[in-house]
Image: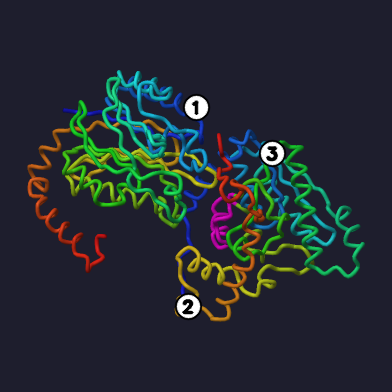
Amino acid sequence: MKLTVALAQINTVLGNLQRNLEKHLALIQEAHARGADLVVFPELSLTGYVLQDLTPAVACKPRGDDPVFQPLLAASQKLDVVVSFVEEDVRNRFYISAAYLSRGQVLHVHRKVYLPTYGLFDEGRFFAWGDTVQAFDTPYGRVGMLICEDFWHASPPYLLWLDGADVFLFMSASPGRGLSERPELASARWVNHILRAYASLYTSFVVHTNRVGFEDGLNFWGSAAAFDPNGDLLVEGPAFEEALTLVELDLNQLHRTRSRLPLLRDERTALVQRELNRILSDRSRNSGR
Amino acid sequence: MNPSPDLSINTELARRILTGFIRSEITRMGFSRAVINLSGGIDSALSCFLAAEALGPENVLAIRLPYRTSSPESLEHARMVIEATGVHSLTVEITPMVDPLIERFPDMDALRKGNIMARARMIVLYDQSAAFHGLAVGTGNKTEILLGYTTLYGDSACAINPIGDLYKTQVRQLARAVGVPAVIIEKPPSADLWVGQTDEGELGYTYAEVDRLLYLMVDERYTPEECIEAGFDPAFVRAVVERVRRNQFKRVLPPIAKLSHRTIGYDFLYLRDWGT
């Protein structure tokens, strides 16, 4: 089976849901016209990234009666859509979330579980931590979604892998930094290292979308990318500019790579659980706690 | 051994990000034009080249603001930049603005005079910003911002600053790459506030030296002790550390005394790009 994914690396209007929604609907239409089965937008694609006190004002609920999700769900009748937004739960906590929409339904919502609050990041000040990491079934197989800092921790992709995900959809709003003599920023190099590593270690597809544009002095570097289960780069979008980059994932590659390299078959999950239990219950040690 | 961290940058990448930044941050504020205080020095020359590339030279106004003691060479170097970039230009001599105030206080020292000149230039720059419908593009580099080698509300005043995260050493590298005339890159940097003034003479060290130290401390998070261990002179390190600390006030908005539940600067938090 083949899955054509459109990587939508967009700029956003900070705090303007309506304008961002319009851009989403136009790109969903374009992705459909170009033959995509799935279009993936970057982190906080509906709102912009450095929201600070705008956070409560741009929150949505991923339901059919939400004015932002209603047209997105209608658009998902044509192809599957992944968007990212500020989610407000029933107790009025705010999350950085991503929703997978398919055929008019919300198949899954992932709430970002790691909120960077250091250096130039201040997410923990404004957002609540998500509490689950789960794979889910789609018309194209079992998928897992993570948002930016989530995949800077090794465990969320590992959990998705064990939960059955063969395609990882990663979304970022990654501020560009680390200018040196090299042709790309350090932040771009770091992210692409780990994307390739996950594809290789988990013999899975890794798809990453990242924002472009500026928010005050921060730049976002784009360069959406997809890696196959051998860790090979399939496609890379342009740096710094908006683009809709299509890539065809040949899902049969999972069969071929895992025949050669049965890392999933040999993964010793009971050993991991046993050792984790031991490490976490040993009160005399600090590692892992 | 004097440590030599590599401050070299990929100039194509820097140019791409900085022109994108100028375009984005000016157009989203509802403008399409820029004004620049063009001194004849390397920093404003670089900002002018970047703004001309980002917005088109027809959308940039470079203003030359000489005082009667300013070096004729500065005026000539500014002219070279105007010619090379094709931007609009205007020359407004600040002497008639500045001299009456200076004459009012006969004991005024060079520092006060220099600050008055820098602030007089700011007044003209912002007035032309309104007349030309363009935002003021800043010309302060990372070295001078960290050292506080700048006049508050004077040369530091701007709407956006494309070069404030580049050390002087890196400004030189990027200036070369974008085509700033060599004579401007190679001359000794000077605020040109009085005859014979040079930055390095006033600061007491060279940009090449202090950039290496600042890069280690700020970018690479070396402690002052580690910089001394790495070979820097202890007195030099202490002087720079203290200078950076003492000038923090120039890098922040004035603190507002908190009284209410929500106070600007503490818990009223929005980017400038709010809604755009």
Q: Which residue is mark 3?
A: B134
Q: Which of labels 3 and 2 is toward the front? A: 2
Which quarter of the image is occupied by the N terminus of chain A? top left
Looking at the rendered structure, the kind of residue marked 3 is Gly
Indicate the secondary structure of the residue bearing disc 1.
Answer: helix
- Write the start and end of the magenta stretch as one range: B162-179
Give me the residue at 15% from left, 61% from top: A278
Indicate the secondary structure of the residue bearing disc 3.
Answer: strand
Looking at the rendered structure, the kind of residue marked 2 is Glu
Q: Which residue is mark 1?
A: A19
Q: Which residue is mark 2?
A: B225
Give me the residue at 17% from left, 41% from top: A163
Given residues A68 and B202, the one toward you in this image is: A68
Quadrant in which residue B128 is drawn: top right
Please, which chain is the residue tagged with disc 2 on?
B
Indicate the secondary structure of the residue bearing disc 2.
Answer: helix
Q: Which of labels 1 and 3 is toward the front? A: 1
Please, which chain is the residue tagged with disc 1 on?
A
> Are discs 3 and 2 both within one chain?
yes
